[in-house]
Every structure is written in C-alpha cells, then in structure tokens.
Amino acid sequence: MNRNRPFYLFVLGMVAVFGLFGQERDTPNIIFIMSDDHASHAISAYKGLYKDVAPTPNIDRLADEGMLFNNAFCTNSICGPSRAAILTGKYSHQNGFYKNEGGDPFDSTQETFPKLLQRDGYTTAVIGKWHLWSEPTGFDYYKYHTLNGEQGSYWDPVYNDNGAHIQEEGYATNLTGDFALEWLEEKRDKSKPFMLMFQFKAPHRPWYPDSKYEKLFDGVEIPYPETFNDDYATRELTAGKTMMTIEKHLTNKDLKIRRPKGMSDTEFKKWQRLGDKGEHVSPSDTLTGMALKKWKYQRYIKDYLACIRSVDDNVGRLLDYLDKSGLSKNTIVVYTADQGFYLGDHGWYDKRFMYEESLRMPFIIRYSGKVKAGRKNDNTILNIDFAPTLLDMAGLRPPKEIQGKSFAPLLFNTDKTGFRKAMYYHYYEYPKWHSVQPHYGIRTERYKLIHFYYDIDVWELFDLEKDPNELTNVYDDLEYEEVVKKLKRKLSRLQREYKANIPLERMRAVTDKGRIEY
Ligand code: CA
C-alpha cells in the first residue's frame, strides 16, 4: 500500500489545487448580443412609446431575468466606431477608428477583450455584423456580413465564413440566428468556456422586414413622438442643418415606393436614391405637406419595428436553446445595440448626435443565479465599459490601457451611486452622411454641454431636468453662467483624463481625412 501513497498525495494535492482554483475563478460563458441601430425606446422593457404596439417579449425576458441599465451611453454614436470602442474599451481617438466613411480600417493588432478571453482559454466567435474593414482577430470562428460597405444585405446575404465568401439564401436576421445556434451546438470546442458575439444587421437602414412581417402593422397608426415637429429653434446651425429628416431625407428606396413603369435599371438605381439630398419624394402627386410627412414616418417606423420583431424572435430562439441545452445557468447574456436612434424624435431618423435618443444604448444583462433578477440601474455606463466588465466577470483583470471601467460591482450589490458622475462624448464624421457637425461634450446627471466646432463655433447647454427633450439651448442664458463655467472645467478634466485634450485643428483633421463630399 505504501507504494501507492505518493499517488494518493498527488491526487489529494490536485483536488486541493483545483478546488481552490474553482472557488476563486468563475469561467462563465458569454453571449454578447448586439443589434444595429436598435434604440432603447423601441424595447418594451424600457417602456417607450411603442411598448404596446410593438412589444419585444424575448428581450424583455432577459430584462425580467436580469438587470436593465437606463443610462448606458455611446462614446461616438455611429456603427463602426462604437464596435471598435466596445472591442477595445477605448475611445475612438485611442483605438483609431473614428468614422465609417473615409477612415482607416480597424487596427486588428491592438488588444481586444475577445483576444484576452481567447488567450485565457475561451473559445470565441463573432457571427453577423462586423463592419470594421479588417479581418476579425481574437476569434476561433467568424462569419460576418460583407457587401454594401460591410453593412450586408437583408436578403440572400453574403458572409465571410472564416475567409470564404458564401452567399446564403434567406433573411439575414434568421440566418445569423441559425449560424449562431449552429456554432453553439456543433462547431465550438465544448471542452472550453465560450464567448460569442451574436450581432444582427437589423434594424439598420434600409429597414427590410422578413416577408412574414411585411404587413405586421397594416391598419395600425403608430404613435408619434413628442418632438416629431421640432422646429430647431435655439439649435438652428446644428440640429437645424441635418440631412436626416423624416420630412425631406428619406429616399424612394427607404420608403419602398413602387418602381415607376417604363424605367430602365440604370434610371431605377438613380431614382431609388432620390430623397437623400432633400429631393421631393412622394408615393402620389396628391400627398403633400404634413400628411406626406406622417405617411413617411408610418412607412419608416413600421418597417423598423417589423425588422425588430425578427431580432426579438431570434433572441427567443437563443434563450430557448440555452434552456434546453442546460447552458442558461452558467452563461452571461447581454443585449445591446451599437448606439441609439431617432424614431421620428426631433423629426429625424439616424443617429450621430450627442442628444439623448442616439446617445443612449440599450443594455440588459442576465447571469442567472448570480445577478439578481428584475433590477434596474440608473448609473451612467459607457460602451467602453463593456470590455472591462466582461473581463472582470470572467475573472480577468482588465489591462491598464483600457479607458472604460468595470461596472460588475453594480451587478452584484445595491449601491447605486458614485460609479460615474459625468461622461465624455466625441463625434467626427462629416458631412457624409447626414450633415451632422462634429462635436464633443459632457453629460452629467443634470446637464449636457456640447461644442460643435468643425466650421461653426456653437455651444449648447441643456438642462435635462427641466427640458428632457433638449428643445431649448440655454447656453447664453445668464441664469446658467456658473453652470457653464463648472461644466467647461469638468469637460477639460475629462479630456485630460482620456488624453483627448488635443487642438481643434487636429480634431478637424480627423474629419477631413478621406472626407467624402456629397
Ligand atoms: Ca449602428
């Protein structure tokens, strides 16, 4: 028996080591679901305008079983830059991806949270929208949308499947759902914990719903947002100068207006784009004025919400799969979007501005048995916080270079104050698309101060408590003189903290690089 003693000691030792290790270190699976342009006010768990007419029961289920953040904000409200900020945990001026148009591809040699997880023994995948121009790194498997500037296509989309370009047959949202389930069930290395980025193309413009949902809202009049007829008084040079209005800037293609008879294919392509620069577009000669604006809104919002129905269905498919396969318990599930969106708010579609509707992102997280169900949190969190938070939850220490900070403590305790008092924002792309002037700014719980600096010099201040819809710029109001001074000091402090205190000329150069004129 003595001969076996060392072996028993060895086994005991291993049990002790792994037992301790197991106690110290959780390696939860992570599914990061991100849709494109899905505003939080179009998710019924957020109780927005559409909660009754267009509910999202499966995303709501995540909120019921997890935690919902009311004040998750984007640091640069546009597709690619938000994705780069999420992957790196850094602002655009640190990760180098500032714009969708005319900038450099994402520098894929830099550190990202998928790479850190992969190096730590996770198997990783990204399926769906990528939109960063360089090949994904840090993933064992990828399958992402190509064509249309990496936006992909709603129907019969082409995917880059680990390097092979494959055209698939069907509707993009459902296909992306199929491929995610296929990876989870068949393709992943089941001996490892996993991290999946499950990223829908929908509900991005041009808002093509699945054929089964094309008539989903027929006969229904979708309600109008409070600021639908914003006249941009006190914000004439900024909000008043965009090319993203429901009234004037939706195209024949956006509005699905029927192709006129006798038009050649070349003429048709040109005709489809009409509206982008404010050309008159109408389904009939008699529909004009406010009636036309309302018709355009109904056409737009119905398609947008119908696209979301398919996203919600596919979130449901995933949650069902996790339940059936026994993965629900040890899998963190996040639902978010790359930014917010204007759903007729201020008379607009699209995003970009630091104003609330596009600044705010949905953020819902479920970690069954660990994060108490059904809670809501009002702390200010940012897209650059997602990477350090997920690393933290996987037991990894976020690298120092990351500018965001982990909000994991907010998930596990009830302390709701003091996480972040003010956030910094910076948008660069101009004039294409939509003519939104580059700007940076600060948002505190009470105020928002913005500087539009490219070829105008305009400051705006909003008192979010008195004016939550941001209709009145009070920057020049003497009553707010002290507030402005304080906010400017805070803004400078944040710029220094984030190494963003660079001269305006350099900021303008970022916009000018590869600039595409209308
Ligand atoms: Ca987007």
Image: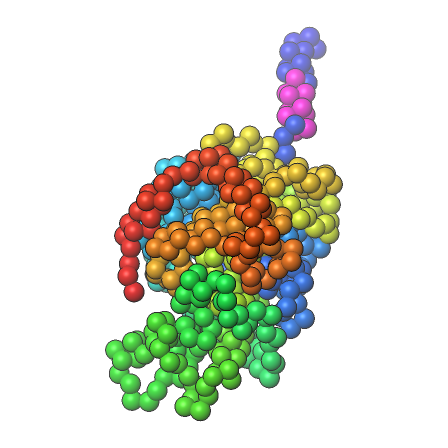
Q: Quadrant of residue 79?
A: bottom left
| Residue sitting at the far top | 2
Residue found at x 36% / y 44%:
504
Quick one: 421 or 160, which is closer to the camera? 421
The rendered magenta stretch, by its main secondary structure, is classed as helix
Q: Is residue 19 magenta?
A: yes
Quick one: 51 or 211, which is closer to the camera? 51
Instruction: Say above or below: 9 vs 95.
Output: above
Residue found at x 51% / y 76%:
297
Model colouring: rainbow
Q: Is residue 35 magenta?
A: no
Q: Position of residue 116 (x, y in %)?
A: 48, 35
Residue found at x 35% / y 71%:
277
Residue found at x 43% / y 78%:
256
Residues in magenta, as a range? 13-23
Instruction: Determine whether, in the image, residue 177 is placed left or right of residue 429.
Output: right
Q: Position of residue 123 (x, y in %)?
A: 50, 40
Q: Position of residue 36 (x, y in %)?
A: 49, 59
Q: How many numbered callouts? A: 0
Figure quadrant of the N terminus: top right
Figure quadrant of the C terminus: bottom left
Quick one: 221 or 185, which is closer to the camera? 221
Instruction: Determine whether, in the image, residue 468 is placed left or right of residue 163.
Output: right
Q: Is residue 38 visible?
A: no
